[in-house]
Image: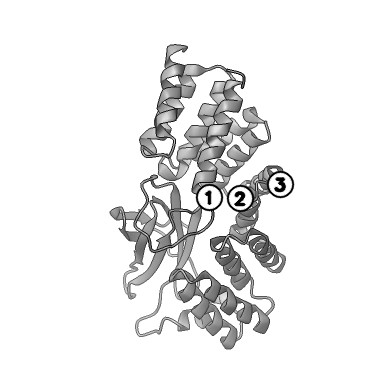
């Protein structure tokens, strides 16, 4: 074989990333068969804006019913396949809050779908949560109304309609960091990465500690294949918060810029944090690194773990052949 084992496997790795990331399609199609390589990440906030810690989250949808629990920052996370989901948060003494999420099967691997669930006081209208929440302090009601309508369109998979309303919201209130951030998320859905990046950067300029926006800058650069820039951003994010997605994408970026030794600890940390389908690519890229090092037994083991999590990967048969060859020489 003319190509090195590492080069050969990176070609395979690039192929699966390309297959999963070729634009945004019809978000109402049936669920995919590629495995749950996406993440639903959310935050639950009480009416006073404080995080709702230790709250059980119910998630129903394509994969059936599952649950998660918020941490001390009110944050929860779970892996998911493509399809439609309803996320519900119940805090004792308050009405149950529900949000819908639609995950496109053509979304890039490891994409995070983020939501915020604002718990309302009994009798409080849903639109009131923005004006009563400290996170939206000083934002004019007209801009908040535009933001709320944009969020509704975004959750209904009308990204273009959402962008138009986010534009109106920031036109009325130029320091609306949350609107710029969400506009960036909408541009990701339309595959307009340059405008997404511009929106995320603007959100950070307004709110320098906006960690979600910082991660999204790195992720957008990652999608643009600017791996050196992406790795630097993910590294900065991880200094502030340990995010499994940042560990995963930093590790992958380091592999692509030919620094596999530095990639290994990040890929392992991603798996240690959440060894499920959303982190499956960590096993795949660890396999690539071990192939380069001629650690064939370890490489085969990682690829087997990847296929166990994503049994219907587009190139599953090629990978099974590769695993067989590695086992013969380990």
Q: Is 121 situated left or right of 2 in this image? A: left
The single residue placed furthest to the bottom in the displayed view is 142
Q: Is 67 situated left or right of 129 in this image? A: left
Viewer-nearest of discs 1 and 3: 1
Can residue 73 be seen in this snapshot?
no
Q: Are marks 1 and 3 in contact (CB under 8 Å)?
A: no
Is the N terminus in the top left, top right, bottom left or bottom right quadrant? top right
Q: Nearer the viewer, residue 133 or 99?
A: 99
Measure the alpha-carbon separation of dots 2 and 1: 8 Å
Name the residue carrying label 2.
Answer: 223
Q: Position of residue 231 (x, y in %)?
A: 66, 43
Q: Quadrant of residue 302?
A: top left
Q: Secondary structure at mark 1?
A: loop
**Is residue 69 placed above or below 284 in the rendered structure?**
below
Name the residue carrying label 3.
Answer: 229
Nearer-N-terminus badge (3/2): 2
Nearer-N-terminus badge (2/1): 1
**Is residue 292 placed above or below 38 in the rendered structure?**
above
Name the residue carrying label 1.
Answer: 21
Measure the alpha-carbon separation of dots 3 and 2: 11 Å
Residue occupying the point 49% across, 47% down = 20
Q: Position of residue 122 (x, y in %)?
A: 35, 82
**Is residue 156 placed above or below 56 in the rendered structure?**
below
Q: Secondary structure at mark 3?
A: helix
Nearer-N-terminus badge (1/3): 1
Q: Are marks 2 and 1 in contact (CB under 8 Å)?
A: yes
Q: Are marks 3 and 2 in contact (CB under 8 Å)?
A: no
Q: Secondary structure at mark 2?
A: helix
Q: Position of residue 283 (x, y in %)?
A: 48, 33
Residue occupying the point 66% across, 64% down = 195
């Amino acid at each position: 074989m003319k190509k090195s084992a590492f080069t050969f496997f990176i070609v395979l790795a690039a192929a699966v990333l390309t297959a999963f990331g070729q634009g945004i399609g019809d978000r109402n199609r049936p669920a995919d068969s590629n495995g749950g390589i996406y993440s639903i990440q959310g935050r639950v906030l009480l009416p006073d804006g404080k995080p709702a810690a230790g709250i059980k989250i119910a998630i129903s949808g394509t994969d059936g019913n599952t649950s998660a629990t918020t941490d001390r920052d009110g944050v929860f996370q779970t892996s998911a396949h493509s399809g439609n989901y309803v996320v519900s948060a119940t805090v004792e003494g308050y009405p149950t809050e529900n949000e819908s999420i639609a995950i496109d099967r053509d979304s890039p691997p490891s994409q995070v779908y983020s939501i915020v669930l604002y718990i309302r006081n009994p009798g409080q209208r849903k639109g009131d949560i923005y004006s009563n929440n400290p996170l939206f302090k000083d934002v004019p009601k007209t801009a908040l109304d535009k933001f709320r309508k944009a969020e509704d369109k975004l959750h209904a998979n009308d990204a273009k309609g959402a962008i138009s309303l986010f534009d109106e919201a920031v036109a009325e209130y130029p320091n609306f960091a949350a609107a710029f951030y969400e506009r960036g998320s909408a541009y990701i859905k339309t595959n307009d990465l340059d405008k997404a990046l511009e929106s995320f950067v603007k959100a950070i300029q307004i709110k320098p500690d906006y960690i979600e926006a910082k991660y999204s800058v790195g992720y957008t650069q990652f999608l643009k294949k600017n791996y050196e820039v992406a790795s630097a951003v993910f590294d900065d994010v991880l200094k502030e918060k340990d995010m499994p997605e940042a560990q995963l994408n930093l590790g992958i970026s380091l592999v692509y810029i030919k620094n596999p030794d530095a990639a290994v600890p990040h890929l392992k940390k991603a798996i240690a944090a959440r060894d499920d389908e959303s982190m499956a690519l960590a096993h795949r890229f660890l396999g690539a690194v071990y192939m380069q090092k001629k650690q064939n037994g370890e490489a085969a083991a990682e690829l087997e773990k990847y296929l166990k999590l994503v049994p219907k990967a587009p190139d599953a048969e090629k990978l099974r052949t590769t695993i067989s060859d590695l086992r013969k020489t380990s």
